[in-house]
C-alpha cells in the first residue's frame, strides 16, 4: 500500500525544462509592479509547460518547493500574488470529488457511454476523470492532491464534503467500498489507519473534517440492508438515478428498474434520514418536450418522490452510447437549443422552494457529442431568459445568501409537505430581502416506514436530515453592532425542530450526522447511538455552546 510518506516524497516531479520555466515565471510574477489576475494569466501563457499551461495550484506548489529546497527565499507577498484572489466557497465547505475505479455497472441504459478506462458513465477526458486516472484511481492520492490544490488556491479545507462518483456504488464489492472510504479519510486525517472505524474515529477531531459523504447509486440496489450499510460507511447523502417517472420511458431506455422501485428506494432512504438527490433526464428516447414537462411535474406531485435536491441532466447523444443506433435509424432526435432552453426554464419555475436544483446540464466534452445542444453556459442563458420574461426560480440555490452580509428575520418559516412514508417540514431562516440564510430538514416518519429500515434506534424518533447555515449573517436587531456571524442560526433551527417534534408526539429526535459534525451535535445535547446521534425530548433544551456550519 502506498503510504502518506510515499505521496509526500513523490508529490513534486517536473522535468528540468519545466523547472526552468517555473523559476522564470515566478521571477516574472515577483517583478510585477502591480499584480492583477490578468497579469498572472498573461505570464502563465508566456511560460507554458509541455502540452499546456501550468495551473495556479502547480505554481504555488512549485514556489513552496523551491523555497523548501533553498532555491528561492520565501516572500509572503509573492505567495499572495501566486494565489491571486482566493475565491472561498460560499458555504465554507470544500467539495472533494473522488472517482471509483473502472468497474462494470449492472445497468444497460442506452444513453450511457462506455469507456473501459473509466467507471461506467464517465468519459476519460472529463476533468474529474482526468484527475482520477492521473492518480491511478487511488482514493488516498486523489483526495490528498485535491485538498492540497484547494489549499494552494486559497480555499479553506477544514470542512470537506466528500463526493464519491462513478458507476453504481452499491455494485462495487463491500470490502472495496470500506477501503475506499477509509483511504479518503486517511488523506483528510494525514494519518494511516488500520480500519475504517479507526479512520472515522480519527476524523472526528481532525483538522480536515468530513462534514458530508455522498455516493451515487441505482434505485433497484437500495434495500434495508444496503441503507444500513451506507450509514455504517458514514454516508449522509445519496444521489439516485431516477432519470424518468414514466415506466414506458424507463423501459425504452433500458433502465432496468421501474418508477415504483424509485419510490420504494426514496421511502427507505428518507426514513433512514439520508439527504436525497435525484437525477432526472429530459430528452430520453421516447420523450418529447411536452411529455418532459408532464414528467417534471410528477417529481413534485408524486408523494413517493419529492427529492431534496435535483440534478437535471439533459440527455446528450454521445458517440460511446448505444443510443447512437436509434439516431442513425432516425428514431431519436435531440432537442434543439431553443426547445431545451424553453423546457428547462419552465422546469426551473416549477421547482418547489424546498428543493435545491444543483445542476441543469452535464458538462460533456463537445467532441463526444454526435448531435444536439452544446450550449455550455445553459444556466446563464436560462437565467437571462427568465429575467427577460419576469419569471424566477425559487429553488434553494437561487435563494442562498451567498456570502453577503444580511439581516435575518426573527421568525423561522415552515414549509410542510407529505411523502409516501410520512411528513416533511422544511424550516428556513430568511433575510429581509427574501434570501435564504439557513434551513433544516425535519422528517416525521410513519412508524411503518421506520420499521422498514430495520434500524431500531430510529423507532419513535423524528429525524433531522440536514442543517445548513449560510454565512455571514447578522440577526435582526443586532444590525450595526458589526457582529457578522452565524448568530446562533443553527441552534435556533434545532430548537424549532425540537419543539415541533415534541408537539407532533415524538419523544426523541435523531440526526444523521457526518463524522465531522458529530462533536457539534454532542455539544447540543445529542447522545451517540449506533448509527445516529439521538436526543431525548423529555429533557429540557441543552444549553447550546456551539454552532453548526
Ligand atoms: S445505471 Fe447509471 S452508470 Fe449504469 S448504465 Fe445506467 S446510467 Fe450508466
Ligand atoms: Zn433555482
Image (cartoon, helix red, strand yellow):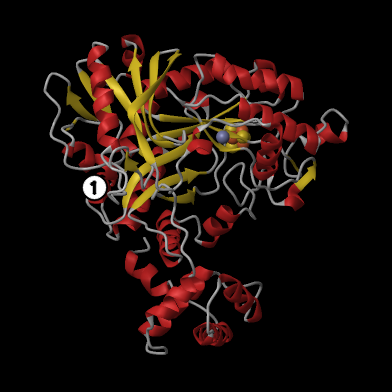
Relative to 348, say whether 480 is above or below: below
Crowding at mark 1 (Cα within 10 Å: few <14, some 14-19, many 20+): some
Q: Position of residue 289 (x, y in %)?
A: 75, 25
**379 left or right of 89?**
right
Which residue is painted at 65% across and 76% down in the image?
45
Let me know if residue 282 appears in the view: no
Q: Which residue is mark 1?
A: 204
Secondary structure of residue under mark 1: loop
Relative to 452, say whether 130 is above or below: below
**135 left or right of 93?**
right
Which residue is painted at 24% across and 23% down in the image?
498
Q: Quadrant of residue 328?
A: top right
Quadrant where the C terminus is found in the figure: top left
Which residue is painted at 82% across and 30% down in the image?
332
Q: Quadrant of residue 509?
A: top left
Q: Quadrant of residue 299?
A: top right
**286 left or right of 1?**
right
Q: Position of residue 252 (x, y in %)?
A: 72, 22
Q: Is mark 1 within 8 Å of ligand 1?
A: no
Q: Nearer the viewer, residue 420 or 86?
A: 86
Amino acid at each position: 500500500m502506498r503510504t502518506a510518506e510515499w505521496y509526500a516524497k513523490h508529490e513534486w516531479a517536473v522535468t528540468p525544462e519545466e523547472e526552468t520555466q517555473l523559476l522564470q515565471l515566478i521571477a516574472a510574477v515577483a517583478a510585477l509592479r502591480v499584480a492583477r489576475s490578468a497579469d498572472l494569466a498573461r505570464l502563465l501563457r508566456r511560460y507554458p509547460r509541455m502540452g499546456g499551461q501550468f495551473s495556479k495550484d502547480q505554481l504555488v506548489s512549485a514556489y513552496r518547493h523551491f523555497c523548501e529546497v533553498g532555491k528561492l527565499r520565501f516572500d509572503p507577498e509573492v505567495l499572495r500574488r501566486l494565489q491571486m484572489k482566493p475565491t472561498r466557497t460560499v458555504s465554507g465547505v470544500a467539495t472533494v470529488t473522488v472517482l471509483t475505479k473502472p468497474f462494470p455497472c449492472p445497468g444497460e441504459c442506452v444513453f450511457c457511454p462506455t469507456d473501459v478506462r473509466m467507471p461506467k458513465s464517465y468519459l476519460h477526458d472529463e476533468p474529474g476523470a482526468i484527475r482520477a486516472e492521473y492518480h491511478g484511481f487511488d482514493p488516498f492520492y486523489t483526495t490528498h492532491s485535491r485538498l492540497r490544490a484547494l489549499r494552494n488556491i486559497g480555499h479553506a479545507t477544514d470542512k470537506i464534503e466528500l463526493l464519491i462518483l462513478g458507476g453504481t456504488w452499491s455494485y462495487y464489492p463491500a470490502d472495496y467500498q470500506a477501503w475506499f472510504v477509509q483511504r479518503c479519510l486517511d488523506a483528510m486525517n494525514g494519518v494511516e489507519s488500520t480500519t475504517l472505524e479507526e479512520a472515522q474515529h480519527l476524523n472526528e477531531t481532525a483538522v480536515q473534517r468530513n462534514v458530508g459523504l455522498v455516493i451515487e447509486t441505482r434505485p433497484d440496489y437500495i434495500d434495508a440492508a444496503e441503507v444500513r450499510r451506507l450509514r455504517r460507511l458514514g454516508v449522509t447523502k445519496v444521489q439516485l438515478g431516477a432519470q424518468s417517472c414514466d415506466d414506458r420511458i424507463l423501459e425504452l431506455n433500458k433502465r432496468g428498474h421501474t418508477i415504483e422501485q424509485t419510490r420504494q428506494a426514496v421511502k427507505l432512504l428518507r426514513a433512514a434520514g439520508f439527504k436525497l438527490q435525484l437525477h432526472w433526464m429530459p430528452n430520453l428516447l421516447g420523450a418529447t418536450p411536452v411529455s418532459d414537462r408532464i414528467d417534471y411535474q410528477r417529481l413534485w406531485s408524486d408523494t413517493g418522490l419529492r427529492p431534496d435536491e435535483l440534478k437535471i441532466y439533459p440527455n446528450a447523444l454521445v458517440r460511446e452510447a448505444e443510443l447512437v443506433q436509434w439516431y442513425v435509424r432516425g428514431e431519436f432526435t435531440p432537442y434543439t437549443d431553443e426547445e431545451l432552453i424553453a423546457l428547462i426554464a419552465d422546469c426551473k419555475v416549477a421547482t418547489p422552494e424546498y428543493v435545491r436544483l444543483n445542476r441543469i446540464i452535464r458538462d460533456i466534452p463537445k467532441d463526444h457529442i454526435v448531435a444536439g445542444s452544446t450550449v455550455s453556459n445553459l444556466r446563464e442563458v436560462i437565467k437571462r431568459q427568465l429575467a427577460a420574461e419576469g419569471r424566477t426560480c425559487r429553488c434553494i440555490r437561487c435563494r442562498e445568501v451567498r456570502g453577503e452580509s444580511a439581516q435575518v428575520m426573527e421568525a423561522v418559516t415552515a414549509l410542510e409537505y407529505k411523502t409516501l412514508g410520512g411528513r416533511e417540514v422544511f424550516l428556513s431562516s430568511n433575510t429581509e430581502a427574501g434570501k435564504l440564510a439557513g434551513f433544516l430538514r425535519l422528517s416525521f416518519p410513519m412508524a411503518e416506514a421506520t420499521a422498514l429500515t430495520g434500524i431500531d434506534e430510529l423507532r419513535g424518533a423524528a429525524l433531522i436530515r440536514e442543517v445548513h447555515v449560510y454565512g455571514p449573517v447578522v440577526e435582526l436587531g443586532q444590525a450595526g453592532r458589526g457582529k457578522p456571524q452565524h448568530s446562533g442560526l443553527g441552534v435556533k433551527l434545532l430548537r424549532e425542530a425540537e419543539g415541533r417534534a415534541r408537539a407532533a408526539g415524538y419523544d426523541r429526535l435523531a440526526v444523521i450526522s457526518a463524522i465531522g459534525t458529530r462533536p457539534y451535535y454532542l455539544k447540543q445535547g445529542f447522545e451517540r447511538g449506533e448509527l445516529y446521534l439521538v436526543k431525548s425530548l423529555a429533557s429540557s433544551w441543552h444549553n447550546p455552546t456551539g454552532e453548526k456550519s
